[in-house]
Amino acid sequence: CIFRDGQSYGLSVVDVSTGEFYISEITGENNSARLIDELSRVSPREILINQSSELDQKLIETIRHQFSPFITFYHEWAFDYRTAYNKLIQHFEVHSLEGFGCQNMRYGICAAGALLEYLTETQKNTLPHISRIRPYHMESYMILDASTRRNLELTETIRGKDKKGSLLWLLDKTCTAMGGRLIRKWIQQPLINQEEIEYRLDGVQELYDNQILLDELVEHLKRIYDLERLMARVSYGTANARDLISLKQSINNLPAIRDLLASCRSAILRDAYTDIDPLEDLHELIERSIADNPPITIKEGNIIKNGYNPQLDRYRRAMHEGKAWIASLEQEEREKTGIKNLKVGFNKVFGYYIEVTKSYYALVPEHYVRKQTLANAERYITPELKEMEESILGAEEKSIQLEYEIFVDIRQEIGKHVHRIQKTADIISALDVLCSFARTAIENDYVRPVISTN
């Protein structure tokens, strides 16, 4: 989202699939060129602009030509500072934006509030996975214009627009999708603060020097799914039982990763050890409730474990006992009637039935009630079979409905912890990138740069 006021720009960027939400501003001189440079870093698919935007037509055409985004001109009122500010504090349930560090970013707030309003309107969802907003100041990173990015081949080659042959391709040995997104971001936003650079390099150095630690971390990182996108699906209410199993399997690796970091000496790895949340309560909830190999759909049953809900267990017992009774019924009726090929079957239209072929019509007992006539057989029902059918099908229907309700409750409970999971996902992705750098350095025999300020 772009908001222009005079010569200043407010910018806000969101990735709806992961919940990442950023705010920034461009002030000072030569702002149109800086705006294009920033858009070249972000490569947006869609851009929101206020209806009475001061963006000149030539700049809009440049944006269209370079990035081919879908451009939406949005309601003017959504960009009003007070309206935008209130939208943000209501969404994040805070009294002010001070805690996020963007309280004084007036132009950025206009863009961010309008963007959140647009998302609320179009996504038809409260967007709980967008749980924080992160300010970034362009002066904290090296300014790279669009042609420099292209010529340096940071993320794609000039000729083929391929990742292979780019700097990203050379450095990216990440194991997780989250790490893959973060390493791209780090490459596109090079740090210029020496302390921050050394903070990262200290971590790379420790992993480079301790290859056993590095290898063990990599093994655990390989087993972690995309936590950011999993939590987006949980928040949207589209996550299925397999997604929760993926979450559980990912969480399963966190205690081991934390233990491996316990004896690390570099500040960045020590901070990771301190801040990583093992999420043991969520692991325990999913372990107790969700079947180990559930179906993809959540409306056909078989997703909740036995013993988790007493009422569900009762329905399942009724189904199991009823089906066992029907299985024994076929043999009993054959013996009683003398009809050797008598068969008990089921279909969704007629329910349970007893099938007798034409050659045995004379042996059909009087209490059999005709249900369906076929070309060479008749299908019957008995009062006992009808009663048991109602019991089984009633229990099955209630069981499936109850399983769905239980699953939705579990999913909502996990959704309440989105902030904890996202915080841990941040740590895991940074750890993944540091491991990637260390592995690249080992393979290519790289040495640590000595930073000079002269």
Image (cartoon, rainbow, N blue to C red):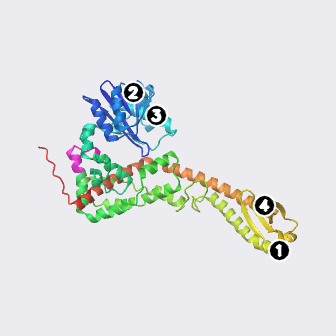
Which of pointers 2 and 3 indicates the residue nearer the eye?
Answer: 3
Label ID, residue 81 = 2
Give how far apart the Cα atoms at labels 3 and 1 are.
71 Å
Asked whether the residues under the numbered discs 2 and 3 touch, taking CB atoms below 8 Å apart as contact, a structural biologist would say: no
Image quadrant assignment for residue 368 = bottom right
The answer to which of marks 3 and 1 sits earlier in the sequence is 3
Q: Mark 3 points at which residue?
A: 118
Quarter holding the N terminus? top left
Q: Indicate left or right for 324 with 91 as reference.
A: right
Q: Can residue 417 be seen in this view?
A: no
Q: Name the residue under label 4.
A: 386
Asked whether the residues under the numbered discs 2 and 1 touch, taking CB atoms below 8 Å apart as contact, a structural biologist would say: no
The amino acid type found where label 1 is placed reads Lys
Which of pointers 2 and 1 indicates the residue nearer the eye?
Answer: 1
Label ID, residue 442 = none
Q: Mark 1 points at which residue?
A: 336
Give how far apart the Cα atoms at labels 2 and 1 are.
84 Å
Give how far apart the Cα atoms at labels 3 and 4 are.
55 Å
Q: Where is residue 451 in the image (x, y as percent from the top left)?
A: 16, 49
Tell me the SS state at disc 3. helix
